[in-house]
Image (cartoon, rainbow, N blue to C red):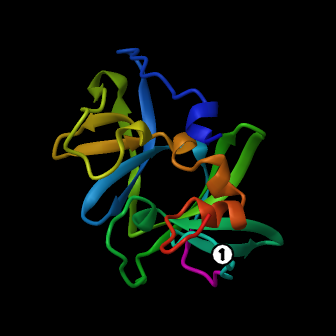
Amino acid sequence: MSQAAAVEPTTLSIDHTKDQKFLRFELDGEFYGLDILKIMEINGMMEITSVPQTPQFMKGLINLRGKVIPVIDLRLKFGLPEEDYTERTSIIVIEFKTVNGTTQMGIVVDRVSEVITINQADIVPAPEFGSKLKSEYIKGMAKTKTQVLIILDIDLILTDEELTFGPKAAAAEPQENQES
C-alpha cells in the first residue's frame, strides 16, 4: 500500500487572518515551498553513502551527528533532469508522516532561498494541469508579489515502499526485461 493511499492529504483550509511561514527553495528554475514546521535543519552537501538496489532518486544515507538519515534527490523524484551538485546545493532535513508514525529524511534541492511569510488568503488550491509534478504532492499555490510558489505536501511525496530502502524500493522503479 502506498503512503499516498494511507496518509490522508492535508486539506487546504484558509483562515484569512493567519500568516504561515514557508522555506522557499529552487528546483530546475521553479520555486517551491515547504511548511517551516516540517523542517529540522538545512545543510550544505555532504558525503552520501549510496545504497544498492534503490531507485535513482534515492541517493543514499548521511551520518548527521551520529544519526543515519536517508536522502533523496527531489529533482530526480520529480522526473527533472539530473544536474551536478554545486556549492548552492542543499540537503533539507525534514520530518514527515508515514503510516508508522514520523520519520526524518534529507531532500536534496538546487538552492535554498529564504523563509517567507504568506497570508493564507494568498494560497489557492493547485490546478489540475500545467505542473511539472503530480498534483497530489501539491498542497496549494501561493501568490507572492513577484511569482507563484508551489507549496508541497511533503507527507505525500514518498510511498511506504519507496521508504523501505531495499528490494521493495527497487521494485517501485520500472525494470526492463523483467520476467515473471
Tag 1 secondary structure? loop
Tell which residue pokes out farthest to the front in this image: 180
Residue carrying label 1: 53
Most frequent secondary structure within the magenta stretch: loop
Circle 1: residue type? Gln
Q: Quadrant of the N terminus?
A: top right
Q: Where residue 156 sits: x, y (%)?
A: 53, 41
Asked if 57 appears above or below 86 in the picture, the reply is above
- The image quadrant of residue 151 is top left
Q: Where residue 103 sits: x, y (%)?
A: 73, 49
Query: In screen coordinates, is 160 left or right of 45?
Result: right
- The image quadrant of residue 21 is top left
Q: Where residue 55 sits: x, y (%)?
A: 56, 69
Residue 158 belongs to the span the image colors magenta: no
Tell which residue pokes out farthest to the right in this image: 66
- The image quadrant of residue 150 is top left
Please state which of residues 8 and 63 is positioned toward the viewer in this rendering: 8
Asked if 29 appears above or below 157 in the picture, the reply is below
Please state which of residues 58 and 148 is positioned toward the viewer in this rendering: 58
Q: Which residues are magenta?
A: 43-48
